Image (cartoon, rainbow, N blue to C red):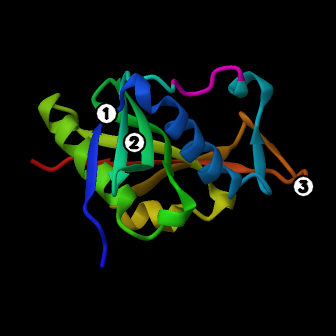
Amino acid sequence: MKKNILVRDANTSDILSVQRVITLAFETVRHIYHPSPSVSAKRPQIDGSSRLVALQGGLIVGTVQYTFDDDRLHLTALATHPAYGQQGVAGHIITCLIKIGRCHHQRALSLSTIRETGNIPIFEKLGFEVLLETPAEDVISVRGWQLYEVYMEREIKW
């Protein structure tokens, strides 16, 4: 039986748990790419500003940072602890982001992902649509391949 998932704003006491979830979630793609040094220097904020956490059984099992970008709420580093994958964590986070977007009269949620990670079908199941694909510039391929950054959006319906 699945436990209830609670999504709330992050606070400063969440920092270590958030870092752990991000590290574990992104370890699953490190055999494909690494952020470039310039991106690594601009890591997502881990403090409570514009960050949500998802809790299951009192443990932080998911997180996302978001920013307001014109008429969109842009997601960065949506991460689910690998042990809690396919349990609805990301879906609960997206539902909360949609509510935030509506309150701020945003048109859509947006995100970028690397095609070669295989995450596009996951985001499509969460309601996102591919709008643009370009050669990735801010990541370094582990195998020396050309990687592609995919921009996706999910309309916020009223």
Q: Residue 82 carries which label?
A: none
Q: In this view, does 139 lie above or below 147?
A: above
For marks 3 and 1, give the CA distance.
Answer: 34 Å
* Of residues 13 and 22, the one drawn nearer to the viewer in this rendering: 13
Q: In the image, what residue type sits under mark 2?
A: Ser
SS at mark 1 in the image: strand
| Dominant SS type (magenta) | loop
Mark 1 burial class by Cα count in 10 Å: few <14, some 14-19, many 20+: many
Q: What stretch is highlighted in magenta?
A: 41-45
Q: Quadrant of residue 16?
A: top right
On the image, numbered disc 2 is attached to which residue? Answer: 110
Asked whether the residues under the numbered discs 2 and 3 touch, taking CB atoms below 8 Å apart as contact, a structural biologist would say no
Which residue is drawn at the image coordinates 51% and 24% (left, top)? 45
Question: Percent x, y for residue 20?
Answer: 59, 43
Taking the image as shown, residue 136 lies to the left or right of residue 20, namely right
On the image, numbered disc 3 is attached to which residue? Answer: 143
Which comes before the other along the chain, label 3 or label 1? Answer: 1
